[in-house]
Structure formats: C-alpha cells, structure tokens
Image: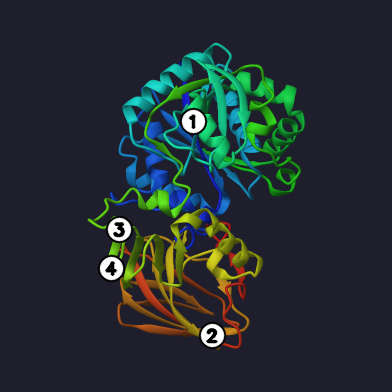
Amino acid sequence: MLLIPTILCGGAGSRLWPVSRELHPKPFIRLDDGQSLLQKAFLRGACLPGVEEVLTVTNRELFFKTEDEFREVNADAVTTSFILEPFGRNTAPAIAAAASRVAEKYGKDAIMLVLAADHLIADQQAFQQAVLKAAELAASGKLVTFGIQPDSPETGYGYLEADGNTVLRFVEKPSLEKAQQYLASGRFLWNSGMFCFSVGTMLQQMEQYCPQILVAAKVCIEQSRSAEGKGFRLLELEPDTFANVPDDSIDYAVMEKSDRVAVVPCNIGWSDIGTWTALGDLTEPDADGNRIQGDALLYDTQNCTIQSNDRLVGTVGVKNLVIVDTPDAVLIADKSSAQDVKHIYSELKAKGHEAHKSHRTVYRPWGMYTVLGEGRGFKIKRIEVKPGASLSLQMHRQRSEHWVVVSGVAKVINGERDIIINTNESTFIPAGHRHRLTNPGTVPCVMIEVQSGGYVGEDDIVRFEDNYGRT
C-alpha cells in the first residue's frame, strides 16, 4: 500500500497573534524543544512505515521558508514535493489539486493521508496505529476522518456523531450546553481535520459532489508551471486560473455529503493549539499555576501565561492573563477571552498595519532582514545573506542606501561598478542606481543597511532580475 502524507500548510493563526503573522503563520511557531509545529507534522508523516515522499500544499510566499524547515529535520532524505498556491482557497481546492497530482504520478490506488501543519500529536505510536486502521478503510473505498475522543466540553471544535467506524452526522461548533450534552452521551468525537483516502475515491466523490472545484482545479494544473529534481517536485499553481476555483472546505464540499465516510476514533494526544491558553499549557506551570517562556519577574501573580524572549516582563497582583511580548507588539488578554485575539488581528489587517503581516525579522529565500529602527525619512536594517545567495537586481526611486558589512564578504553591483566589500567596509547607493547584493563566501554575510529619503516603504522597488521570482 502506497501512502503519501500530505501536509496542508496555510492560514494566519490569527488567535496566536502577535507571534503568528501572515508571513509567519502558526505552523512556524517553535515549541520549547526547538521544533516548529510544521517540522513536527513533517516528521509525523515521514516516520510512518514505507513513506518515501511527503507532499506539502502551501502558499507561494512560504515556500522557501517551508523548505528550510524541512531541511533541518529531514535526516532520512525523504522526497519532498510541493504544490504552491498564489493565495488561499480553503481545503477542498488544496485536496483536489493534491489528489490529482498524486493520481497522475502514482495511480488512483495511492492512499493520501491529509495532515494539518499546525496541530500537535503527543502519542506517535497511537497515531501510527490509527493511520494503519484508516489506510485499511481507505483501501476499501472509504473517506476516513480521525475522530478525537473528547475530554472536555470544547466549544472551539467541530464534532461528529459516530457508531463505531460509521459517521452518523457532522456537527458545527456547539454552544457550551450542547458540548456538555455531546460529552455526556459518549457518541460524539472532535473532528480533527485529518483525513485518509485513496485518491481515486476522493476524485470520484469530488466529481459527484463538487464538480466545479475539481474541474477548475484540473484546468489550473494544466496551466501551471512544474519542476522536478532529485528528491524534489514542485507545482506552482497559475494565479488567474486558480482564482476561478471555488472556495470551500473539504468538510462542506464532500465529507458531509458523501455516503462513504468512515471514522477512526482515537486518543492520540491531539490538539489544534488554537489559542494562547492551549499553547501555554504545553509549558510546565510553577507553584502558582503560571506558565512562563522567557524572562519574567512575578509578584502576587497566579494562573498566567507569559511569553517574552527579548525583554523582561514584570507582573504584580494579576490573575488569569495571557501576556505575549514581541519586539513590535504586546498582547494582554484575559484567559477567558483567548479565542477573541483574532479580532485584534482582523482589525490590524483591515487598517493595513504591518503588525498583522510580518515581524521585524522577515525571512526571504536569500536569508533574512530585521528592522532595527525607523522614523520619518529613515530605516535601519540588519541583513543576513546565505552563502551563495543573491538579492534581486533592483532600484529605488525615493531612497538612498548605505551598506556596511559587519561580517563575511559581499559582492555588490552599484550602478556601473562591480565591487567586493569586506568586513568593516561600506558603500553608498544613491536613489536611482541599479544595485545588487550577493554573498560569494561560504559563511553568512551580515550587513547593516541605512535607508534615507522621502519614502522608505518596502514597495519602493523596481526589480530587473530575480533568482527567486519574488524578492
């Protein structure tokens, strides 16, 4: 039986703002052991018996970051393949594209295991047993979902009513009263959002229940660019045709309509880490029930979740708070309102505030940059370029730039000149000059960039050549 773990990596993780941002969503959050949720999802799938390839569906802007995450943990050199979306279109289009792609390469009997990139599963052995059972059902023509045995009347999850492996009905996120009734009945499971099926069965069911999604996805694939290399496959979905694919979840589009749905009830230590309370619970509490990551000094403080990696946080006489400090934003919330953090994120997005989109440190295919300071007419950045990497050949109309190399070496195009800048050397790039930065060395090149001019926004840029097609 051929099993292809398929990771869906998207979403904003708005309830985990300010650590989660549009360009640094929840899957990239790192836990106390140093691994991100995305890395854990990859290892969860890659470690299953007989798996030789892990497929990931993610946003185009997150591709290089996802590659870097996998490279850190892929010691067994499992083949990684990617489907890149230009923008989000929910889970049904993602699964339609993935199932079509897997069927094309491996045939319709191949089994797909769909995993979310931002969930946590504590019991890998129990998970593996659940997957084996699900794969058996999938091979017999079932669309299988994983139902989590509930241990509390959770109102933030969807439920399903089950009799053994038979799904009787799906239920939306309930009121507290309904959730209590579901828990007491013993017939209801949390809907985990993980699935297992043969690609032939899923494609047939999509053709029956959501043909518009399937047809539009296939048309998009035909117009899309693909690439393949050793241990690597890539499909980059074409934006104009992808915009024609209807937006819908796989639950609404197929699972709630199909008569082939089965469930594997399981107790695998599952959590979708949907709030700061849930994330904080992964940290051991102190004697007063406080869960602390980073540097904090507490007095008369109980049952608080505090995260601060850059600054000291002091608290006096508070209870039941979530306090999250990042270099450019601070969150303070009552634990009972942890689900409502998403409203702050939505308001920032509506106002076009950068704090919904990115941190001061932004990752790019060539490396990263951190905004150290900015004000009227200036911005200061720390730029780190990977060995052998290069920024785009570009020009700015409204700002000049001063570059100072603080470690490594830089090869610079500055107007008509090609120059080498060593550590503790600098160059000045006037507005209107074409320029490019390349690291020709074998260690990272670190540079301080000082921008000055009437406008220093990131969109003041004209690109002439770009190795990565985006930045």
Q: Is residue 21 above or below residue 330?
A: above
Residue in the image at 34% along x and 83% along y: 425
Q: Which quadrant is the N terminus positioned in? A: top left
Give the crowd class for mark 4: few <14, some 14-19, many >=20 residues within 10 Å: few
Question: Which mark lies nearer to you, 1 or 2?
Answer: 1
- The amino acid beneath tag 2 is Ser
C-alpha distance separating marks 3 and 1: 28 Å
C-alpha distance separating marks 4 and 2: 51 Å
Q: Nearer the viewer, residue 374 or 171?
A: 171
C-alpha distance separating marks 3 and 4: 11 Å
- The amino acid beneath tag 1 is Leu
Indicate the position of residue 293 as horizontal and vertical percent values: 30, 60
Q: Nearer the viewer, residue 309 or 370?
A: 309
The label on residue 400 is 2
Q: Secondary structure at mark 4?
A: loop
Give the crowd class for mark 3: few <14, some 14-19, many >=20 residues within 10 Å: many
Label 1, on which residue?
183
Q: Secondary structure at mark 1?
A: helix
Mark 3 or mark 4, earlier in chain: 3
Residue in the image at 51% along x and 35% along y: 180
Give the crowd class for mark 2: few <14, some 14-19, many >=20 residues within 10 Å: many
Label 3, on which residue?
290
- The amino acid beneath tag 4 is Asp
Q: Is residue 260 above or below residue 304?
A: above
Indicate the position of residue 272 as horizontal and vertical percent values: 46, 42
Label 4, on which residue?
300
Relative side of 378 to 406, left or right: right
Relative side of 234 to 249, left or right: left
Q: Secondary structure at mark 3?
A: loop
C-alpha distance separating marks 2 and 3: 48 Å
Residue in the image at 37% along x and 65% along y: 440
